[in-house]
Amino acid sequence: MVNCSNYGSTDDSTPPHRPLALDHPRPVSIIMTTDTTDDDDGSVKKFQWTAATIAQSIFVFLLAGVAEIMGGWLVWAAVRGDSSTTGKRPWWFAILGSVVLIIYGFVPCLQPTDSFGRIYAAYGGFFIVLSFFFGYALDGDRPDRGDVIGSCVALGGVLVIMFWPR
């Protein structure tokens, strides 16, 4: 355990240094390895991000977002309605929304990587952006500057989470 109480003192001693991955630059490539997956025969292989798997991943995130938001909106519109003159939508909106939400539950299984936690964490950034988009498209709730900046920060975080070389 390192004692941090004397850091910044006039003592010339330096704390023990353990090299981090960032201390050693690596060449950047479109092909990045990450999670390990087990094959049917029990062997372990490294997953590789390629242009095709990146495109697949982004498409699946967008599909999941559309399914979750539209399914949720259909239920919301039937149960809560909106403040405009249309009010609540018919009961079958809730049924249709529930079916769409069930389908949404299977969409993340189409991701090319097996990292459940990482996929759902990264999906959150896409969900934020798509929520603002559909809120504006369906209900006229225009995102403000803070919403746009926050969405950009969230998507930047998604890129770090998903594509950080491991």
Image: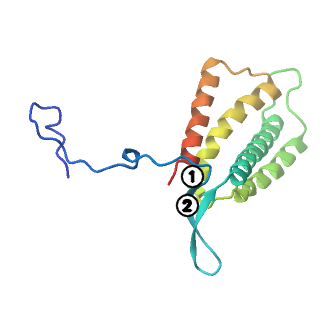
Which residue is rendered at x = 62% and y = 61% of the image? Answer: 114
Q: Tell me if 156 is positioned left or right of 127 in this view.
A: left
Element class at badge 1? helix
Mark 1: which amino acid?
Arg
Which residue is rendered at x = 77% and y = 46% of the image? Answer: 63
Element class at badge 2? strand
Q: Is residue 82 visible?
A: no
Which residue is rendered at x = 53% and y = 48% of the image? Answer: 164
Q: Tell me if 126 is positioned left or right of 19 in this view.
A: right
Mark 2: which amino acid?
Asp
Q: Residue extending furthest top?
A: 145
Occupied quadrant, residue 123: top right
Cα–Cα span, label 1 and label 2:
10 Å
Q: Earlier in the sequence, mark 1 or mark 2?
A: 2
Q: Nearer the viewer, residue 42 or 120?
A: 42
Query: How many callouts does the rendering have?
Result: 2
Occupied quadrant, residue 67: top right
Q: Which residue position is annotated with label 1?
A: 118
Q: Residues within 10 Å of mark 2 (few under 14, many from 20)?
A: few
Q: Pinpoint residue 148: horizontal percent, then vertical percent.
A: 64, 24
Q: Are marks 1 and 2 in contact (CB under 8 Å)?
A: yes
Q: Which residue position is annotated with label 2?
A: 35
Q: Pinpoint residue 15: horizontal percent, then vertical percent.
A: 18, 44
Which residue is rendered at x = 88% and y = 34% of the image? Answer: 89
Q: Nearer the viewer, residue 157 or 33?
A: 33
Q: Residues within 10 Å of mark 1 (few under 14, many from 20)?
A: some
Q: Nearer the viewer, mark 1 or mark 2?
A: 2
- Above or below, 49 relative to 88: below
Q: Tell me if 149 is positioned left or right of 101 in this view.
A: left
